């Protein structure tokens, strides 16, 4: 299983949000570019960057995002406020390995499906779930259809992956609720990454054994030192297959 460090950006700073509230960020006093390099040097083969300024409808942090992409030394997938083909193409041209689309994927599936065919294996579907329902607009709006219906709509689309966020686990600070994610992973047609479920090393170990889960996105737990990235990557490695001794 892949451990994917997450860097969430607001006004040029690394932050974490409580309940998705853009006006109440926890600010981490670290340099985002240096932090990206640190994660890469620790062994991360993929970084996840979220631009909260773009989520808020403000000017996207293009210079900072591009700097991270160019200097981190590893692949970077970018999400946050990507609502048009043009914006997705702009990020891919910057060098983003993948772009993550959630709200627009729910509201304009035909456009996102066309984009996925134009950029096969570079479009990631974001499925955010709260109390069993699909959430859009930065977790603020409940969609009129179920998460399963959204997954089905993209079942034949050449997506790179699906990122499933269990908002209940992410915002309530309770034991990771793996049932929702494992259920969706069982029917997914592409790799699934779990988000919002990791607050300790034990969570990494638990996710590792869920069928269909290829990776886990971890952000706050890395910044508050609840999870050590090097150790998490080691825990997430597959167990060696036993070999019979034919002596």
Image: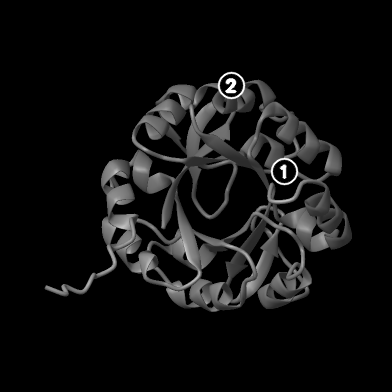
Q: Name which residue lies at 53% across and 55% down.
A: 19
| Along the viewing direction, whichever of 246 and 20 lies nearer the viewer | 246
Asked whether disc 1 touches disc 2, contact meaning CB atoms under 8 Å apart, the reply is no
Q: In which quarter of the image is the C terminus?
A: bottom left
Quadrant in the rendering for residue 235: bottom left
| Along the viewing direction, whichever of 152 and 24 lies nearer the viewer | 152
Residue 42 visible in the displayed image: yes
How far across and how far down the image is residue 187, in percent? Answer: 61, 77
How far across and how far down the image is residue 241, in percent? Answer: 29, 67
What secondary structure is found at the residue carrying circle 1?
loop
| Along the viewing direction, whichever of 137 and 80 lies nearer the viewer | 80
How far across and how far down the image is residue 63, in percent? Answer: 65, 20
Rounded to the nearest angstrom, the CA distance separating label 1 from label 2 is: 19 Å
Residue 200 visible in the displayed image: no
Quadrant in the rendering for residue 208: bottom left
Residue 11 higher or lower than 4, as above or below: above
Q: Name which residue lies at 84% across and 44% down.
A: 84
Q: Name which residue lies at 83% across and 61% down.
A: 109
Quadrant in the rendering for residue 85: top right
Residue 205 higher or lower than 245, as above or below: above
Q: Is residue 169 left or right of residue 63?
A: left
Residue 237 higher or lower than 33, as above or below: below
Number of other residues with Cα within 10 Å of mark 1, as a class: few under 14, some 14 to 19, many 20 or more? many
Earlier-in-chain disc, 1 versus 2: 2
Residue tagged by mark 2?
Answer: 67
How far across and how far down the image is residue 155, in percent? Answer: 73, 70
Disc on res. 81: 1
Q: Quadrant of the N terminus?
A: bottom left
The single residue placed furthest to the front in the displayed view is: 247
């Amino acid at each position: 299983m892949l451990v994917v460090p997450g860097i969430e950006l607001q006004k040029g700073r690394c932050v974490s949000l409580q309940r998705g509230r853009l006006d109440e960020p926890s600010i981490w006093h670290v340099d985002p570019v240096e932090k990206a390099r640190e994660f890469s040097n620790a062994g991360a083969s993929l970084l996840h960057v979220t631009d909260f300024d773009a989520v808020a409808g403000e000017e996207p942090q293009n210079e900072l995002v591009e700097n991270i992409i160019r200097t981190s030394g590893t692949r970077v997938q970018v999400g946050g406020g990507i609502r048009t083909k043009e914006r997705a193409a702009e990020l891919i041209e910057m060098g983003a390995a993948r772009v993550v689309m959630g709200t627009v994927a729910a509201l304009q599936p035909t456009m996102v499906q066309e984009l996925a065919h134009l950029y096969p294996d570079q479009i990631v579907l974001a499925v955010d779930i709260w109390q069993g329902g699909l959430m859009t607009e930065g977790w603020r709006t409940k969609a009129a259809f179920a998460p399963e219906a959204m997954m089905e709509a993209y079942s034949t689309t050449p997506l790179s992956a699906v990122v499933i966020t269990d908002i209940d686990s992410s915002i309530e600070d309770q034991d990771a609720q793996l049932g929702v994610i494992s259920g969706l992973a069982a029917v997914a047609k592409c790799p699934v990454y779990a988000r919002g479920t990791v607050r300790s090393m034990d969570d990494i170990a638990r996710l590792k054994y869920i069928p269909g889960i290829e990776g886990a996105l971890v952000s706050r737990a890395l910044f508050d030192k609840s999870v050590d990235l090097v150790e998490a990557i080691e825990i997430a490695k597959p167990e060696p297959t036993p070999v019979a001794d034919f002596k």
